Image: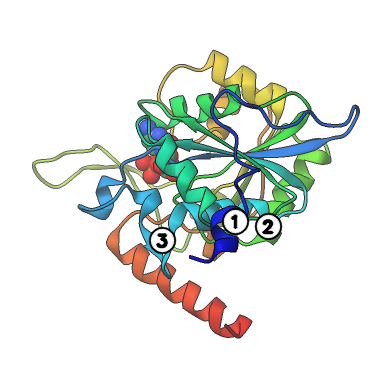
Amino acid sequence: MSPEDTNLNADLMSDETTQAPPSAPGAARTAAVIPAAGRGVRLGPGAPKALRTLGGTPMLIHAVRAMAASRAVSLVVVVAPRDGAAEVKTLLDAHTLPERTDFLVVPGGENRQDSVKAGIDALPPGYDTVLVHDAARPLVPVDTVDAVIEAVRDGAVAVVPALPLADTVKEVEPRADGPEPVLSTPARARLRAVQTPQGFERATLVRAHETVTENVTDDASMVEQLGLPVVVVPGHEEAFKVTRPLDLVLAEAVLARRRKNDGF
Ligand code: C5P
């Protein structure tokens, strides 16, 4: 680690009680919340998922850089494991991140929703557009991030990047002890696999998190439950979620290809 790497973010890092500087009056600003408090058990034993390395760099740092790569994003809030906020701060400190972006670290909660809410609660005034991005999607390209932000700024209250499915999907009666009966086969052409970052008008996201209490797997579905429209923009195949061991192999390959193409 270079001295530059160690020192660069010292003045950018805030503790949990410190907020990023307030925005200029009237300016529409975008913040990204990254829930990174999961244990990632499906990847197998080892470090928490967000701290696993890809190409020698923790997945969380890739995810933070992916958000900060957008010039529209001026604050990134990282939601750390409840007992790991200090470790995550040290980690951010030790890596080169854009100087124009502010960073906050807050402790997370029991489930993903609690962690996202902790991130939203830490947002200072002045951020009208909020992205929620899983640390488990470290390689999302900046064009996808920008497309989501643009759709929110164009007036959508909730925006999700998504891709059509290659596989046919069956709804089943889940069973642990034998073959699962198929209940239905939704028309594939109408289905989309949803990614992150998901983008929101801030007030809508806050209301969704205050209103919806049952467990959900993404934030946009909470907005759907409010009866508000959610729209889809094209996702990207490199925005896949690193969940299982094979995903790590794929992510390493994508990263190696990028590094080769970038000439380093
Ligand atoms: O478990 P899953 O893969 O759905 O997690 C999605 C994202 O939510 C991950 O980035 C994970 O770190 C985060 N998460 C969290 N707090 C939890 C559980 C998951 O921030 N309690």
Residue occupying image coordinates x 54% and y 31%: 221
Q: Please determine whether, in this image, residue 106 is positioned above or below residue 75.
A: above
Q: x, y (%) of residue 99?
A: 71, 52
Secondary structure beneath label 1: helix
Q: x, y (%) of residue 104?
A: 59, 36
**Which residue is identified by label 1?**
65
CB under 8 Å between callouts 2 and 3? no
Query: Disc 2 marks which amino acid?
Result: Ala
Select label 3 or label 1 by which is in front: 1
Query: Disc 3 marks which amino acid?
Result: Asp
State the image quarter where residue 12 is shown.
top right
Q: Please determine whether, in this image, residue 10 is positioned above or below residue 113.
A: below
Q: Give the crowd class for mark 3: few <14, some 14-19, many >=20 residues within 10 Å.
A: few
**Which residue is identified by label 3?**
167
The residue at label 3 has a CB less than 8 Å from ligand 1: no
- The disc at residue 69 is 2
Q: Please determine whether, in this image, residue 253 is positioned above or below residue 69.
A: below
Label 2 – label 1 distance at C-alpha: 6 Å
State the image quarter where residue 126 is shown.
top right
State the image quarter where residue 176 is shown.
top left
Label 3 – label 1 distance at C-alpha: 31 Å
- Return the residue found at the far top: 211
Q: Give the crowd class for mark 2: few <14, some 14-19, many >=20 residues within 10 Å.
A: some
Q: x, y (%) of residue 263?
A: 61, 85
